[in-house]
Amino acid sequence: MSAQAFIPVLQALMSVNNQERMSAEAFFSAQLEGHPIETINALLSLLADASSAVPVLRSFAGVLLRRAVEKNKGTFSPEVLGHLRQSLLQIWCNENDLSILKRLAHVLAQSASNSAWPDLLPSVINHCNTSIQGARFKQ
């Protein structure tokens, strides 16, 4: 399922209508159970897309992404986990919205819990150094 196709699902998950929300919860759970990688990729895409997704939907996608990673991380191959982590770091490097950065931090922490991530600290330091150098050039 594409990221854009997930937008109505996220909207329904936040609905005040109990029936609509329960249907969306059942659909989302089934998608996550049957297609965890595709669902996580759709949530990643929504979280990364600052131009088309409404900020509250992006934030909610981050919450759902953290939960999905928590539930499924043990089933990921090293390649899938590496791709997820690289994608999260890329979004983190490009993001300016503090609420989205907070959601990213939670997903990054969940991804790193109970498993080695030797590239995390060097990646963060490299990004910080690059950001500092970029800021110096702008002055």
Image (spheres, rainbow, N blue to C red):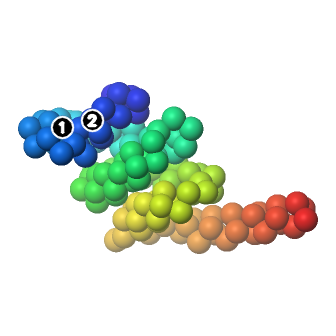
Q: Is residue 23 above or below residue 69?
A: above
Q: CA distance from mark 2 to mark 1?
A: 6 Å
Question: Please, what secondary structure does the residue beneath circle 2 have?
Answer: helix
* Image point (30%, 32%), residue name: 8
Question: Please, what secondary structure does the residue beneath circle 1 have?
Answer: helix
Q: Which residue type does callout 2 highlight?
A: Val
Q: Is residue 49 above or below residue 2?
A: below
Neighbour class for label 1 at 10 Å: few (<14), some, many (≥20)?
many
* Image point (18%, 45%), residue name: 16
Q: Which one is earlier in the sequence, the residue at label 2 or at label 1?
A: 2
Q: Measured from the top left, where is residue 21 in percent x and y?
A: 16, 41
* Image point (63%, 52%), residue name: 94
Taking depth in this image into account, of 139 and 86 the one nearest to the observer is 139
Q: Is residue 46 above or below residue 135?
A: above
Answer whether residue 87 is visible to the viewer in this image.
Answer: yes
Q: Measured from the top left, where is residue 119 in percent x and y?
A: 57, 65
Q: Measured from the top left, where is residue 48 in percent x and y?
A: 52, 45
Which quadrant of the figure has residue 139? bottom right
Question: Does residue 46 appear left or right of residue 74 in this picture?
Answer: right
Answer whether residue 22 is visible to the viewer in this image.
Answer: no
Q: Measured from the top left, where is residue 115 in percent x and y?
A: 38, 68
Neighbour class for label 2 at 10 Å: few (<14), some, many (≥20)?
some
Q: Which residue is mark 2?
A: 9
Q: Residue furthest left?
A: 19
